[in-house]
């Protein structure tokens, strides 16, 4: 199996697992949650490794997995930067109060969020620029707004709980607004650290990144549908749908525009070179084009 097919196969299994999620309950749903995170982690890290090389994959693991664990451990111990919270025992083994599956989830979505920002903003000039800053900001928003879906869903399942959930966003009780600000803060730091560590290969996108774009757009669309219909969490469907659209919609537009052939490209419609000709002139032109060159040459000699 080729590298590309392997990644698409992993994505297909991930999608199937997510489709099954709302159809299960209890321990089965918790196990499926952990399996989904592991699949997403393998997909993102595997893509970084196969498409960008060892340096980028290691940088992703260090920054997103290592950094995600560190900020979660800090949050559980001190309440900063998210607010006071704690995990139940349903998400598997824990280290310093953090389920080992949690930093994998950060990594799972950090990489497609970064590539989404790269695809939208284009390649920046060498060195620091406004485009570089915009890319970091967009990648951070693309990652942090995912939590507008994730946190209400996980709290509803009882996988973690907040000690003080006020103030909260309208319609999203049980999750303090400080949590989303904490996510955004860490996402900015994550994106800012990823680029220099991952190397210049992380500064461009190509056809190999199609599975990551599909993953990001699937996560967005499936989350809106699942929260609105199956999980009965309409408020998070609205908040997440609006928030994550800041990256998902421009990505979809960029991908659609990229599929349109440019003028002169193979497959582009031919230009109307004879738009100004009369009907008789066009008929003469078609007749001339249909005459073999040797016949036309003999006519010229005879004339």
Image: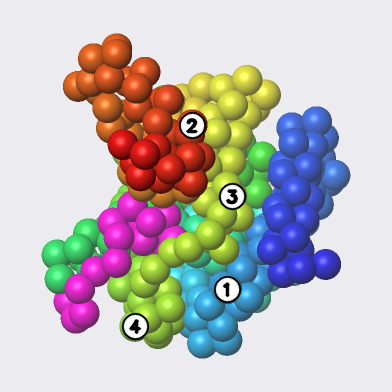
Dividing the picture into quadrants, the one containing residue 244 is: top left
Residue at numbered disc 1: 51
In the image, residue 122 lies in the stretch drawn in magenta: yes
Residue at numbered disc 3: 215
How far separated are the C-alphas under marks 2 and 4?
A: 60 Å
State if disc 4 and disc 3 touch (CB < 8 Å): no
Q: What SS does tag 1 mark?
A: helix
Residue at numbered disc 2: 290
**Residue 9, can we see it?**
yes
- Mark 4 vs 1, N-terminal side: 1
Q: Residues within 10 Å of mark 3 (few under 14, many from 20)?
A: many
**Does residue 41 sit above or below 83 in this rendering?**
below
Q: Mark 2 or mark 1, which is nearer to you?
A: 2
Residue closest to the far front: 302
Q: Which mark is residue 264?
A: none
State if disc 1 and disc 3 touch (CB < 8 Å): no
Quadrant (top left/top right/bottom left/bottom right) for the N terminus: bottom right
Q: Which mark is residue 196?
A: 4
Dividing the picture into quadrants, the one containing residue 286 is: top left
Q: Position of residue 226 (x, y in %)?
A: 62, 29
């Amino acid at each position: 199996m080729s590298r590309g097919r392997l990644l698409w196969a992993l994505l297909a299994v991930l999608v199937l697992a997510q489709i099954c999620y709302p159809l299960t309950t209890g321990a089965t749903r918790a196990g499926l949650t952990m399996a989904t995170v592991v699949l997403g982690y393998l997909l993102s890290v595997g893509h970084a490794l196969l498409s960008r090389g060892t340096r980028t994959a290691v940088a992703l693991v260090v920054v997103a997995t290592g950094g995600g664990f560190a900020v979660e451990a800090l949050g559980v111990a001190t309440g900063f930067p998210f607010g006071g919270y704690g995990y139940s025992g349903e998400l598997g083994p824990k280290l310093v109060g953090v389920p080992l599956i949690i930093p994998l989830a950060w990594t799972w979505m950090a990489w497609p969020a970064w590539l989404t920002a790269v695809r939208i903003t284009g390649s920046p000039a060498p060195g620091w620029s406004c485009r570089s800053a915009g890319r970091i900001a967009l990648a951070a928003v693309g990652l942090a707004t995912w939590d507008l879906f994730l946190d209400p869903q996980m709290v509803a399942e009882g996988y973690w709980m907040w000690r003080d959930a006020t103030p909260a966003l309208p319609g999203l009780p049980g999750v303090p607004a400080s949590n989303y600000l904490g996510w955004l803060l860490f996402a900015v730091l994550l994106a800012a650290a990823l680029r220099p560590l991952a190397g210049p290969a992380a500064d461009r996108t190509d056809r190999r990144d199609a599975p990551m774009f599909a993953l990001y757009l699937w996560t967005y669309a499936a989350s809106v549908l699942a929260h609105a219909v199956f999980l009965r969490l309409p408020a998070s469907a609205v908040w997440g749908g609006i928030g994550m659209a800041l990256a998902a919609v421009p990505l979809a537009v960029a991908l659609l525009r990229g599929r349109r052939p440019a003028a002169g490209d193979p497959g582009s419609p031919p230009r109307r070179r004879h738009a100004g000709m009369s009907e008789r002139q066009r008929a003469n032109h078609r007749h001339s084009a249909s005459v073999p060159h040797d016949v036309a040459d003999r006519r010229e000699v005879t004339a």
